Amino acid sequence: MKIAVLSGKGGTGKTTVSASLAMSLPSCQYIDCDVEEPNGAIFLMPELEKPSPVKVLVPEVDMAKCDACGSCAKACQFNAIAVVKDNVLMFPEICHHCGACLIACPNEAIKEVERVIGVVESNKDDSFLHGKLDVGEPISIPIIQQLKRRIKTKGDVILDCSPGASCVVVQSIEDSDYCILVTEPTPFGLHDLKIAVQLVRKMGIPFGIVLNKASDDSRIIHEFCREEGIDLLMEIPFDQDIAEGYSRGILPVQNDRTWQEKFIKLYEKIERGAGK
Amino acid sequence: MKQVVFISGKGGTGKSTLVSSLSILVENKMIADCDVDAPNLHILLKGDVQKKDDFFGAKEAVIDPELCVKCGLCEETCRFDAIEECKVSVMKCEGCGACVLVCPQNAIKLEEVKTGETYVSKTNRGTFSNALLDIGAEGSGKLVTEVRKNVNNYKKKEEWVLIDGSPGIGCSVIASMTGADAVIAVSEPTKSGKSDLERVLGVARYFEIPAFVCINKYNLNLQVTKEIEAFCEQEGFPVIGKIPFDETVVRALREFKTPVEAGNSVVTQEIKNIWSRINDEMKKLESVS
């Protein structure tokens, strides 16, 4: 079963929930799809093997063959190529690697070369995987794709996603069997939770909510779940000790059997919710 | 007009709380929310929308079934697996137009797609520009750029624009940073917060934008706060403020109030100090250049 963890708002506890679940299950594959700011390794402390670079194909022009006709620049929908007088300017960071310029060039003057935009790292048995976008690079989707190509066909997979609800989250949660939406009982948490709910509904993935930092104000989330008929799977209370542990990279499941049991129960609810 | 962008790397460290507090304390400014896929600032600013526009930030291939002979060339060419049995998957299509170029029947066209909405609002704290990306849409970076264009279009003689950024280090963050005068990175004393701060400061350095650091809830873990300060010292990023954690701040936010409105004097004073340090640092930068 593939379980994706998302939230809309950042900092609500996606990694807390994903890593806790990963630690509580007897075996599973944990994949950190937040390749802009991956944090899973801080908690799961895997022994990482040598990083493998993530390469994309970007165009390179052979000026001996190029007559600066401008067809490539016209074909590029992402403004990654400009033809100025007799010169072709390439902006490889914003290239979407689509190959349209190659097709458009009448002189076969463009070939594709590899360009590294980040890395994927894993432990020995691939039970932990994360990706890291290189600093200064805007496009992270190819790294998420590379991570997802290494999903194991057997067993459970936990996908820890980025905040927000843009195309990177779509890419991460696509083909999941179930989504966990992590929220907090604040007006911001609720606002962004609604956005995340719209996203998973649009994609037709079964989902439920984990309420983190639960407090006297949890009512706003309870009401929302009731009105919308959404399963509230679990509540993690706001607790100074939990927050302090988190700041040091330690999760409650690591030294508390009862927390492990709670996450196993969460897993069982997900199994039922996903109809597996 | 000087543009100050608030980012964090990690989400939930307190960007919007700081920006909305400053929106009360700073005179003569505009405000922009460049977090377009999970925007929150409008919740605290409560403005009146003056102008709302659809934003067409992407394209999408559309196949004319009348002309299509089902040769499959488009499907073969598409690198995003967006075409299956001569049908385009809207979620997967990046609008690159490679299929348009190979179609022997000229049966494929690129059509503009609405990817979000932009808003310009009047608030009692100044003109506010923000946007909302459509659910799961492409091109959040482009929409961010549009939010900043609106700042330019609607500015009068404001001295500042306070820009609330998004988490991460990718396209949205780069789009909110480029061309800004200063970056304020809002961090928190957790291992994750520190790791994410280091990466986002790297982005500011990469684009050569002066960056300053503010540690929110600093007293939650004094050890990590020390480590962040040591890192900033070593890398040459001035720490311009440390805001203490305070239960009353959290409570006030639940009632849609900033710490300033809730009358939290310790936090308000530190935010005032942060602003005066930003001013000092900006003056230093000007005298250098």
Image (cartoon, rainbow, N blue to C red):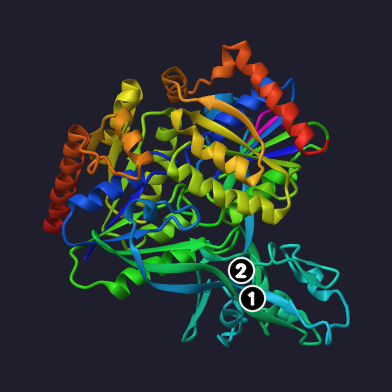
In the image, residue A11 above or below residue A216 = below
Residue B236: which quarter of the image? Answer: top left
Q: Quadrant of the C terminus of chain B?
A: bottom left
Magenta stretch secondary structure, dominant: loop
In this rendering, does residue B85 appear at all? yes
Residue marked by disc 2: A59
Taking the image as shown, residue B273 lies to the left or right of residue A3, namely left
Q: Is residue A133 visible?
A: no
Amino acid found under the numbered disc labelled 2:
Pro
- For discs 1 and 2, the disc positioned in front in the rendered view: 1
Q: Nearer the viewer, residue B116 or B277?
A: B116
Quarter location, residue B87: bottom right
Instruction: Answer above or below: position of A170 versus A45.
Output: below
Regarding mark 1 in the picture, which secondary structure is present there?
A: helix
Is A122 inside the magenta-drawn segment?
yes
Identify the element where label 2 is drawn.
strand
Numbered label attached to residue A101: 1
Q: Are marks 1 and 2 in contact (CB under 8 Å)?
A: yes
User: Toward the viewer: A186 or B33?
Assistant: A186
**Mark 2 neighbour class, 10 Å CA radius: few under 14, some 14 to 19, many 20 or more:** many
| Amino acid type, residue under disc 1 in the picture | Cys
A165 relative to A189 in the view: left or right: right
B195 in relation to B62, above or below: above
Q: Position of residue A24 (x, y in %)?
A: 67, 20
Q: Residue at x 62, y 81 (%)?
A: A65
Question: Which residue is pictured at 52% across the width and 31% down the height?
Answer: A212
Question: Magenta residues, as a range?
Answer: A121-128
